[in-house]
């Protein structure tokens, strides 16, 4: 087996971990499909095991291998031949690629674990929003809790808490307090900004343009990303939503009130920020410094 990695660092063990991350991502992706299907319907994500939604036939373990089973079965149930949505292998593949990207970007660190959990969370929210136009509370609150918890074990990228602390205290508080404060500030700022926009839209148009689900989702996103990156996420999500929204409305001839899954765009924005947020932020800060 040949494993192609960047020239100069080709040793076996280094190629094995990324492949492991990818395969682990496929398996987690398979579980995320269950979450996407069952959480909005308020069903248990643990039991019963998967069955065909049409004929009720239990899906055997060998027909439940991520991506491969769907391909071998031609996207059909083995028993009744009903078509099985391409969403299943797509979610598995997407999760696997995101896990691989997390490992390649952050290496064997707790950061990789943190961003892989975040990516899994975003996959569930993003796909659920496309399918049903909802962002389940359970997922949002799990995300908020996980984001705050991870802040205790990883260094904050944000620096806002340190900036504030330097003005208030002679000695900077311990790292763990700063990191937690950044996560809490990110949750407040992300959800606060969206709540403000949602409330403004409601006041002006007299009806809801954005659900509270988006506000809660940004609390979770902010807890992982901190203030600066949470604001970047809202900016990137709005930009993506506007561009893709205008395009969709133009080609589909749907009326202008066609409801776009804003959570999906926020999710895409958040993932872009995870992988490209730091260089973008440094570039922006260098622009400010030049002035
Ligand atoms: Zn079936």
Image (cartoon, rainbow, N blue to C red):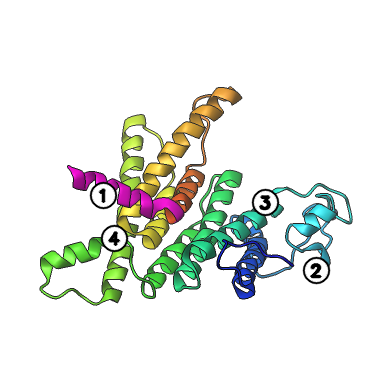
Task: Please give the residue where the numbered disc 2 appears in the rendered image.
Answer: 61
Is 120 situated left or right of 85 in this image? left
Camera-side mark, 3 or 4: 3
* Image coordinates for residue 277, horizontal then vertical, percent: 39, 52
What is the residue that sits farthest to the front in this orientation? 8
Residue at 20% x, 48% y is 289
Task: Please give the residue where the numbered disc 3 appears in the rendered image.
Answer: 90
**Residue 133 in sight here:** yes
Q: CA distance from mark 3 to mark 1?
A: 37 Å
User: Does 102 lie within the magenta span?
Assistant: no
Q: CA distance from mark 1 to mark 2?
A: 51 Å
Is 97 situated left or right of 108 in this image? right
Camera-side mark, 1 or 2: 1
Image quarter (top left, top right, bottom left or bottom right) of the N terminus = bottom right
Return the residue nearer the eye: 144 or 150.
150
Q: Which image quadrant shows ligand 1?
A: bottom right
Q: CA distance from mark 4 to mark 2?
A: 44 Å
Q: CA distance from mark 3 to mark 2?
A: 19 Å
Residue at 79% x, 54% y is 70
Magenta-tinted stretch: 275-291
* Earlier-in-chain disc, 4 versus 2: 2
Q: CA distance from mark 3 to mark 4?
A: 34 Å
* Earlier-in-chain disc, 1 versus 2: 2
Camera-side mark, 4 or 1: 1
User: Does 284 lie within the magenta span?
Assistant: yes
Task: Please give the residue where the numbered disc 1 appears in the rendered image.
Answer: 285
* Image coordinates for residue 89, horizontal then vertical, percent: 71, 54
Return the residue nearer the eye: 77 or 18.
18
């Amino acid at each position: 087996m040949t494993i192609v990695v960047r020239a100069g660092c080709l040793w076996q063990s280094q190629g094995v971990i990324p492949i492991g991350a990818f395969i682990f991502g496929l398996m987690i992706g398979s579980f995320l499909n269950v979450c996407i299907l069952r959480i909005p319907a308020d069903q248990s994500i643990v039991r019963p095991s998967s069955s065909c939604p049409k004929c009720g036939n239990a899906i055997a373990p060998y027909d439940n291998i991520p991506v491969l089973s769907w391909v071998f079965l031609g996207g059909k149930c083995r028993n009744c031949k009903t078509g099985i949505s391409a969403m299943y292998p797509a979610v598995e593949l997407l999760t696997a690629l995101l896990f691989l990207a997390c490992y390649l970007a952050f290496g064997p660190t707790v950061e990789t674990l943190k961003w892989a959990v975040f990516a899994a969370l975003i996959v569930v929210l993003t796909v659920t929003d496309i399918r049903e136009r909802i962002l389940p509370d359970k997922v949002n609150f799990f995300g908020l809790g996980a984001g705050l918890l991870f802040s205790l074990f990883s260094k904050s990228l944000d620096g806002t808490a340190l900036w504030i602390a330097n003005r208030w205290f002679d000695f900077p508080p311990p790292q763990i307090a700063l990191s937690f404060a950044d996560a809490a500030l990110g949750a407040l700022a992300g959800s606060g900004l969206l709540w403000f926009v949602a409330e403004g839209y409601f006041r002006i148009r007299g009806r809801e343009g954005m659900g509270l689900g988006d506000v809660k989702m940004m609390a979770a996103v902010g807890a992982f990303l901190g203030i600066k990156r949470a604001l970047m996420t809202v900016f990137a999500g709005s930009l993506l939503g506007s561009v893709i929204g205008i395009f969709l409305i133009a080609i589909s001839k749907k009326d202008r009130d066609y409801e776009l899954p804003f959570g999906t765009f926020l999710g895409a924005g958040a993932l872009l920020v995870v992988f490209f947020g730091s260089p973008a932020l440094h570039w922006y800060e260098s622009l400010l410094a030049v002035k």
